Amino acid sequence: MKKSSILLAAAVVGAGAMLLAGCSGTSSSSSSGSAAASGKRACVILPDSASSPRWENFDRKYLTDGLQAAGFTADVQNAQGDTSKYATIADQQLTQGCGVMILTDYQGAAVGVAKKAKAQGIPVIAYDRSFTGSDYYVSFDNVQVGKLEGQMIVDGLKKLGKDPASSTVVYMGGDPTDNNAAMFRTGANDAMSAAGIKPAAEPAGVWDQSKSATNFQQALTSLGGKVDAVWVANDTNAAGVISVLKNSFQAGQIPVSGQDASVVGLQNILLGWQSGTVYKPVKDEADAAVKVAVALLNGQTVTADQKLADGTPYISVTPKSVDATTVETVVSAGDASASDICNTAELQAACTKYGVK
């Protein structure tokens, strides 16, 4: 998949919209009466805090800051892994008035919200996760994310002198209700199958560290306790897998993939327990979403040079692969801090070795 560009066709912007240039907002604030009446608020719903620390640590800040800098009020809420709460938040936001909605889906909850929003003439941006009924989709190139993960496994096996085609590889994917999980799996399988890899076991996908650990333990047991590599869809799930590998004294001896460049993921990479992670600079994705949202709030037309299978315009952002030698790039970008990562004597030594500061 190629990186998409955003083409903004400028339209005549009414004076009323420009009056909002001085407005500001917070994640819990409501707009002023005039802003609510005109619908010039950006309403954002994030999915949870458990699947990844990114939502609260980064997305909330970057989306809020970007929308406020453009002169609009940002109402950013988190459903905390509860579909009922997701719907309630949406109803409250729609009652107050939204000029645009930016939704990260959680188990299909965004679909119903999108229907309500569009019935009111409010454009909907699917953020990070695609779902039926959105007007635009802004995310990283998810198939490429999977390809980078799959290549970590192939390269890791070759580095150990193992033939990928004859290796025992377990696939640990994400929650099937998240459309991105399928794209991650497609990309990863493209890279691994090209090297002759077939899944020796593939438990049901989840976005949950504890469940991932349980599922992997069962898969490992079914394989007689031996595995050559584990493709894991994200760092949170990888932490669960690594906990099991530690118990079986295999941690650090087999390739394990991940994504999100979370603090725990970066620590596991520095300690040699995880091969790498796919770094998705959240600010890049948030900036792309803000650019689309602001264009819509200003009455402009947004087009993209690629589409999803259902025809939804897709604005994609390029991910990056990170290993121990490039962890510092995440810190330099401000998406992690050395003080959080290098918080034990063992990690301090690893940080010194790899120049993380």
Image (spheres, helix red, strand yellow):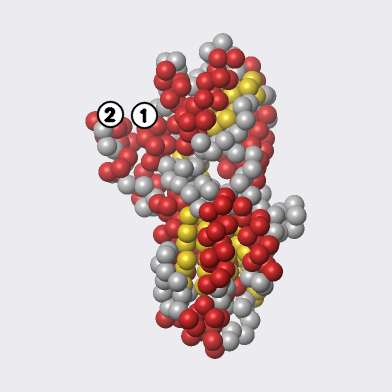
Image position of 213 with respect to 145: above or below: above
> What residue is rendered at 49% in x and 83% in y?
34
Percent x, y of residue 86: 55, 55
* Amino acid type of the residue that numbered disc 1 sits on in the rendered structure: Leu
Q: Which residue is mark 2?
A: 346
Q: Quadrant of residue 90?
A: bottom right
One can see residue 3 in this view = no
For the residue labelled by badge 2, is the local secondary structure a helix, a strand or a loop?
helix
* Furthest residue toward right: 310
Q: Secondary structure at mark 1?
A: loop
Q: Position of residue 249 (x, y in %)?
A: 42, 15
Tell me where residue 71 appears, x and y as whole percent: 45, 76
Residue 337 vs residue 98: left or right?
A: left
For label 1, the residue is: 271
Query: As rendered, which of 248 and 332 lies closer to the eye?
Result: 248
Amino acid type of disc 2? Glu
Q: Quadrant of the C terminus?
A: top left
Q: Are marks 2 and 1 in contact (CB under 8 Å)?
A: yes
| Label 2 – label 1 distance at C-alpha | 8 Å
